[in-house]
Amino acid sequence: MIVRIRGRALPDGEYVDLYADGDRWTTDPVPGADLVAEGWLLPGLVDAHTHPGAEEPGDPMDEEILRADLHRHVDAGVTMIRSPGLPGEPPEWFGAEPGLPRAVHAGPWIAQHGQFFDGWGRRATHAELPGLAAAQAKRTGWAKIIADWRVGDEAVPSDVMTAVVEAVHAVGGRLAVHSQHAAGGEAAVAAGVDSVEHGMWLDPGYLPDMAPAGPRSPRRSRCSRRRSGGRGTVRTPRGNGGSSAGRRRIRG
């Protein structure tokens, strides 16, 4: 049975027909579809920054907690998550199980020695960062670097960050960077990373350059933000979620 639903699609209120074509909803007509419902149509939400799968910072990945986090996302209307950093390597069903959100993720965080939460992520020297990030991005599409941490800690230098960006882009990946101090944000923007996460103390003067930049534009970046999905062809729920829809909020 091929399912069709009809209704006014929010936020514009345009009247549309949606067809279930395999594991996708599409506006392209599918022959033989049966109309099963009519009403108002709201696109699934996207949580663009979440770290599911652990109770507290530093705890190992727990599949039961991960699954519970993802179900809370679905309950909140989230059908896709972006997870720039995870407590560990996710299970095979993550991002692929029917009934749970789809997922884009960067694997475990990558940080300098002496920085970030103990027990989470991998530690690397400046010389090791490019290769480690590129290997992760080749596997999962994204890598996540912790550019800075406590007050007084050394931020990843701009030339090292640039080498990481070049290595990640060379394998077709993207680089997300955690920044909560000015130096880390400046290095990230100068290097042309694909997203700046958090960006506290980032000079507002960088924003005009960041806003119109594409994800691969050299010497530019963009700030991540939550937004809802659009109309047209959208994926139905499958795999991963966490902090914003759950009871915990974990920074990283």
Image (tube, rainbow, N blue to C red):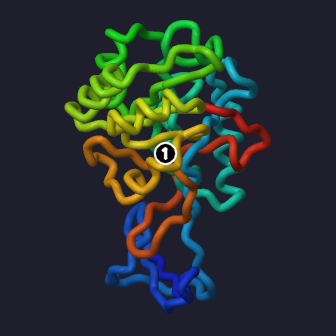
Question: For the view shown, which residue lies furthest in the front direction?
Answer: 205
For residue 91, above or below residue 73:
above
For the point 56% across and 89% down, the residue is 13
How many other residues sit within 10 Å of disc 1, few (<14), some (14-19) or many (≥20)?
Answer: many
Q: Nearer the viewer, residue 107 or 216?
A: 216
Q: How many marks?
A: 1
Residue 174, horizontal then vertical, whole percent: 34, 38
Q: Is residue 1 left or right of residue 55?
A: left
Q: Nearer the viewer, residue 62 or 217?
A: 217
Residue 166 occupies quadrant: top left
Please state, as top left, top right, bottom left or bottom right, where the C terminus lies in the image. Answer: top right
Q: Is residue 1 visible?
A: no
For the point 65% across and 39% down, the residue is 67
Residue 73, horizontal then vertical, whole percent: 66, 51
Residue 162 occupies quadrant: top left
For residue 20, above or below residue 191:
below
For residue 8, above or below residue 211:
below
Tell me the element at label 1.
Answer: strand
For the point 37% across and 11% down, the residue is 126
Q: Is residue 247 visible?
A: yes
Residue 121, horizontal then vertical, whole percent: 53, 18
Question: For the view shown, which residue lies furthest in the left direction?
Answer: 170
Q: Amino acid at mark 1?
A: Ala
Please state, as top left, top right, bottom left or bottom right, where the N terminus lies in the image. Answer: bottom left
Residue 169, horizontal then vertical, whole percent: 25, 35
Question: For the view shown, which residue lies furthest in the bottom direction?
Answer: 15
Question: For the view shown, which residue lies furthest in the right direction?
Answer: 247
Q: Nearer the viewer, residue 112 or 79?
A: 112
For the point 51% across and 7% down, the residue is 113
- Pointer 1 residue: 103
Residue 227 occupies quadrant: bottom right
